[in-house]
Amino acid sequence: MSKDGSFILKPSDADQLGAQLSALVASGRVEEARQFLAPVLAQRTPFPILERIGRALGATDAVAIGVLLDRIADDRTEGGWVVIAGALGRQLSIGPERALERCRLFIVSADIWYAADIFGDRVPGPFLLDNFEGCLRLLSPWREDPNAWVRRTVGIAAHFWAKRSRGEKSSIPQARALLAFLEPLFSERDLNAAKGIGYGLKTLGKFYPGLLSQWLPAQLRRPHRSLMLLKALTYLSPAQRAVATKGLGR
């Protein structure tokens, strides 16, 4: 334990803890597993360690481990959402439909911005990298979800994809497709959802400024929050901003 009271766990410790939790769940001792994890979640354990614990959990049977994930969610700790997201991220490879639907339900249950961001960075974001077309297909209903946090998460996933693809020429067709996918969300009115979507556009603008500047004029003809445009323009050069806002007097 460190001087500030946080647990000092190495990656190997996280793997071992995840394996121990999995063994407890497999033997039907879900509550014991929850209590075993609780001290780690009560401290300022680094997110990478918590995610690693979750990924170790996610390697086990999805249905069995789902009971523990529900119990962790009941405690509503910030670190708990990271563990859950790590587990669901690991389960994408064996059951993406179920993993994403569970992810959506946890986002709704958490009902707070940081949980939406935690899940977006660890479940749909990585899935976009691994299976771009499949992820867009499964995320399509999220754009019209009645829950604003779910809609926000689409923007966070776009941010993750753009950050990891880093503007590579081979990724340009996907970046163009992702912008087309985000079109219905440019008119988002909920402030919290708009912040997440704008964040995704901001990062796309950092790595694909030419594409974004060409995409924006058509979007600006529709009602939109000024925040959305401000975020989208963040990394554009003066010339690119002029192209993006032509006709708006900017």
Image (tube, rainbow, N blue to C red):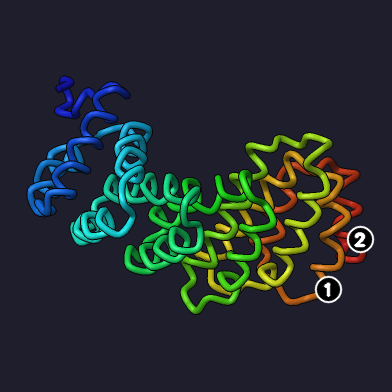
Give residue 27's mark. Answer: none
Count residues near mark 2 (Cα–Cα under 10 Å), then give few for <14, some for 14-19, many for 20+. Answer: few
Callout 1 crowding tier (Cα within 10 Å): few <14, some 14–19, many ≥20: few
Horizontal side, residue 107 vs residue 70: left or right: right
Q: Is residue 151 above or below residue 114?
A: below
Residue at coordinates 38% horizontally, 33% vertically from top-left?
48
What residue is shown with label 1? 221
Between residue 31 and residue 196, name the one nearer to us.
31
Check the picture and name the quadrant holding the N terminus.
top left
Q: Which residue is mark 2?
A: 246
User: Dot 2 lies on which element?
Assistant: loop
Image x and y of residue 73, in percent:
25, 58
Q: Secondary structure at mark 1?
A: loop
Which residue is found at the position 26% from the left and 53% from the top? 65
Question: x, y percentage for residue 175?
Answer: 76, 49
Q: Amino acid at mark 1?
A: Arg
Q: Is residue 25 above or below residue 39?
A: below
Q: Position of residue 211 (x, y in %)?
A: 84, 49
Cα distance, mark 1 to mark 2? 11 Å
Quarter that holds the C terminus: bottom right
Residue 15 % position (x, y): 29, 30
User: Residue at 58% of width from left, 76% of height from top?
Assistant: 144
Amino acid of disc 2 = Lys
| Disc nearest the viewer among 1 and 2 | 1
